[in-house]
Image (tube, helix red, strand yellow):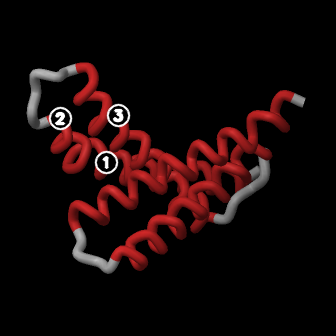
Amino acid sequence: MMMRLLKPFFTLLMFLIVLAFVHTILAITATLPAWLGLGLSILCAATAARFAWQLAAGARPSVYLAISGGALILGALCFTAGFWGLMIFAKETNQAPLIGIFIAAPLGLIVGAIGGYRYASGQAEH
């Protein structure tokens, strides 16, 4: 019963975090039209939400979904921690957003993709 309540919350939370992450990164680094940036952000967030839903349900995701979902979710969480966390807890550092953008997010993307691949590979063996 508890999992039935947590699964939609967890999925929505991952959708919103990835949506904010991708939209922020695209707004900072790319000169895309607003509708295209929003569309790409929603597409990435939907991919991460689908992976989060399958992860919470205990279903076996495809390798592509595990890699992309893991990269997006962990990249977004690391970006959020590096970008906003340092601005909240270390107010005296003016380079806090740069740590989130250039260090935490890329490392989260890489580690998340590797973790997603390992998760999908481990699921395929069982």
* Residue at image point 29% right, 52% down: 106
Q: Earlier in the sequence, mark 3 or mark 2?
A: 3
Q: Secondary structure at mark 1?
A: helix
Q: Is residue 124 visible?
A: yes
In the rendered image, the residue lying farthest to the front is 34
Amino acid beneath label 1: Ala
Q: Depth-wise, is mark 1 or mark 3 nearer the camera? A: 3
What mark, if any, has residue 81 been given in the picture? Answer: 3
| Residue nearer the viewer, 30 or 99 | 30
Q: Secondary structure at mark 2?
A: helix
Q: Say left or right for 106 vs 5.
A: left
Amino acid beneath label 3: Ala
* Residue at image point 29% right, 78% down: 32
Q: Earlier in the sequence, mark 1 or mark 3?
A: 3
Q: Position of residue 115 (x, y in %)?
A: 50, 48
What mark, if any, has residue 54 been given in the picture? Answer: none
Residue 28 falls in image quadrant: bottom left
What mark, if any, has residue 96 been given in the picture? Answer: 2
**C-alpha span from label 1 to label 3:** 9 Å
What mark, if any, has residue 105 been given in the picture? Answer: 1
* Residue at image point 19% right, 21% down: 90
- Verify CB contact (< 8 Å) between mark 1 and mark 3: no
Total tally of numbered discs in the picture: 3
**C-alpha span from label 1 to label 2:** 13 Å
Q: Say left or right for 15 vs 41.
A: right
| Residue nearer the viewer, 58 or 123 | 58
